[in-house]
């Protein structure tokens, strides 16, 4: 049995709360049972993945949390029906149920298989190695980020652009290794060191200039969450920072990013895009009426009825999945293997397949739902893997596809990194890889299509390159030379 009796009891209590809450708010009884069943198996998948101390367990928690738990919690608090805004409530609820049953089965099976003996990624044995790794990661990841954002179409893949995109995917996580280093060396300034604060300011500024909500906010979110890992969930200082970050996102980042990308911020030359971005950002800061107008019109709510909750629509992905599921039912647009094979085409190197797709299938699916304008061939829309599988092969696709995809992916990660766990007393390499897995896949595992999720399988190979470069540079920059401190400046980082 992959879960203990105590974990089973906890799961049943939480499931019972959500089932009763839905019934009390007037949700259809069958839909309530299906969504409660999905929550039950989603919770079990957390424990099957090792719980919240293991990276796989955390990814499953993010999955069930962003699809169901957060959204339905808000619905219960506001005393609204959980299915009131869904266009195909029964189909969507059944997709959620089959999907999370599949996630549980896939997680259970991969955990039962023999543990891979090959661990390609290095375990750093000294603080100096962590320091060198932090420097290499920051330089390469933000070099890739600057290259792809300067082209204005950072989501495209293939050729050198694809390589730089993989590098850029590590930029948000680059805040964590130097924090690990400072923590390991006993620095009292591990969260307020000038280098850490400068990195936060740098990432937020670049995110705004590239019109990326994720780029602007993700490093700050990782910074806060890593603080919680050390100090616990009840630290008032961290909650104050979290509230300030939420206000920044709702008041500035979300409405600004939604508006400027449609006002020329992602089109034309670097100079043209910079001019548009600077003008809009300046008006956001100095013109209160303009700022309020953008906040009201930033985007329609999906699962939530209140427009004020529009910035948090991605925390209730069941509403986004419902769009694709209902559109598939209405138009009978089941796509079969098309969007699944799409992913295999994406991961083939361009020199082997010149006509490979340039982006994942999110835009293609957006035209099915009507979210994409007829002339839009670039914007990616998020519906999740389960909805994508339903669009491909109906309920059969969800039942068969989810255990294969999630079980295979988790085993693939274990092949590289083993089973990274959180160690709060003193961070080790296991803690570092724990944070990397969550940082790298928390977004795609929830929001990407099957093809988009598959292209992220390149990321562990870049970790191999980073570790190799780190080991090589440590030979040229030894931690101590003739009694002196590291040439890499380790002493400058200590408090």
Image (tube, rainbow, N blue to C red):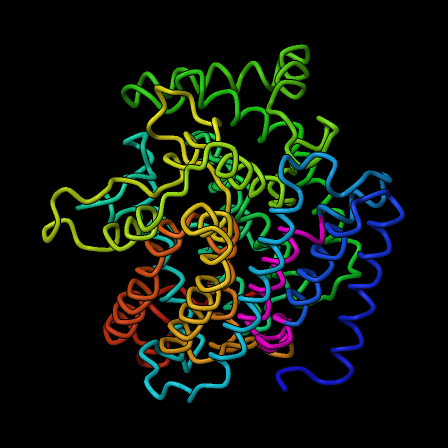
Figure quadrant of the C terminus: bottom right
Residue 443: percent from left, percent from top: 50, 51
Residue at figure coordinates x 31%, y 19% from the top left: 271
Is residue 77 rendered to the left or right of residue 274?
right
Is residue 144 rendered to the left or right of residue 25?
left
Q: Is most of the magenta stretch helix, strand or loop?
A: helix
Report the front residue among 107 and 379.
Answer: 107
Residue at figure coordinates x 63%, y 35% from the top left: 87
Total numbered badges shown on the rendered structure: 0
Residue at figure coordinates x 63%, y 37% from the top left: 313
Given the current orientation, which residue lies at the most extreme right position?
A: 24
Please determine whether, in this image, residue 390 is positioned above or below residue 231.
above
Does the stretch in magenta take in 58?
yes
Is residue 141 rendered to the left or right of residue 27?
left
Please determine whether, in this image, residue 101 is positioned above or below residue 48.
above
Q: Which residues are magenta?
A: 45-70
Residue at figure coordinates x 60%, y 19% from the top left: 285
Does the stretch in magenta take in 140?
no
Residue 307: percent from left, percent from top: 71, 26
Residue 181: percent from left, percent from top: 50, 68
Report the front residue among 174 and 37.
Answer: 37
Residue 291: percent from left, percent from top: 64, 17
Figure quadrant of the N terminus: bottom right
């Amino acid at each position: 049995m992959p879960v203990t009796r105590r974990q089973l009891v906890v799961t049943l209590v939480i499931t019972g709360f959500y089932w009763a809450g839905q019934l009390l708010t007037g949700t259809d009884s069958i839909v309530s049972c299906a969504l409660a069943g999905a929550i039950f198996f989603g919770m079990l998948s957390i424990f099957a993945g090792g719980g919240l101390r293991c990276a796989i367990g955390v990814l499953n928690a993010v999955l069930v949390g962003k699809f169901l738990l957060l959204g339905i919690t808000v619905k219960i608090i506001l005393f609204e029906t959980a299915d009131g805004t869904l266009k195909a409530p029964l189909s969507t609820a059944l997709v959620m149920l089959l999907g999370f049953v599949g996630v549980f089965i896939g997680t259970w099976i991969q955990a039962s298989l023999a543990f891979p003996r090959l661990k390609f990624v290095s375990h750093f044995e000294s603080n100096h190695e962590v320091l060198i790794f932090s420097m290499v990661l920051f330089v390469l990841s933000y070099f890739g980020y600057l290259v792809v954002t300067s082209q204005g179409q950072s989501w495209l893949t293939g050729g050198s652009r694809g390589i730089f995109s993989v590098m850029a995917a590590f930029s948000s996580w680059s805040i964590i290794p130097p924090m690990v280093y400072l923590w390991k060396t006993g620095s009292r300034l591990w969260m307020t060191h000038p280098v850490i604060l400068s990195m936060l300011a740098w990432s937020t500024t670049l995110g705004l200039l590239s019109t990326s909500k994720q780029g602007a906010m993700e490093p700050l979110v990782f910074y806060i969450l890593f603080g919680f890992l050390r100090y616990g969930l009840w630290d008032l200082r961290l909650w104050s920072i979290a509230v300030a970050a939420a206000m920044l996102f709702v008041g500035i980042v979300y409405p600004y990013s939604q508006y400027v990308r449609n006002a020329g911020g992602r089109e034309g030359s670097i100079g043209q895009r910079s001019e548009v971005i600077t003008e809009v950002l300046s008006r956001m800061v100095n013109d209160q009426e303009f700022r309020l107008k953008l906040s009201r019109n930033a985007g329609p709510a999906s699962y939530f009825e209140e427009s004020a909750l529009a910035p948090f629509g991605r925390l209730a992905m069941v509403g986004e999945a419902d769009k694709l599921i209902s559109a598939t039912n209405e138009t009978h647009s089941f796509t079969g293997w098309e969007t699944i094979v799409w992913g295999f085409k994406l991961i083939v190197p361009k020199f082997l397949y010149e006509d490979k797709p340039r982006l994942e299938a999110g835009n293609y699916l957006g035209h099915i739902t009507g979210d994409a304008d007829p002339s839009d061939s670039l914007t990616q829309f998020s519906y999740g893997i389960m909805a994508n599988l339903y669009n491909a092969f109906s309920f059969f696709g969800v039942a068969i596809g989810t255990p294969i995809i999630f079980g295979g992916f988790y085993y693939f990660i274990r092949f590289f990194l083993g089973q990274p766990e959180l160690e709060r007393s003193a961070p080790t390499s296991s803690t570092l890889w724990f944070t990397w897995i969550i940082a790298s896949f928390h977004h795609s595992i929830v929001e990407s299509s099957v093809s988009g999720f598959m292209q992220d399988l390149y990321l562990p190979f870049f970790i191999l390159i980073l570790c190799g470069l780190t080991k090589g540079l440590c030979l040229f920059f030894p931690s101590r030379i003739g009694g002196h401190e590291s040439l890499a400046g380790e002493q400058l980082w200590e408090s």
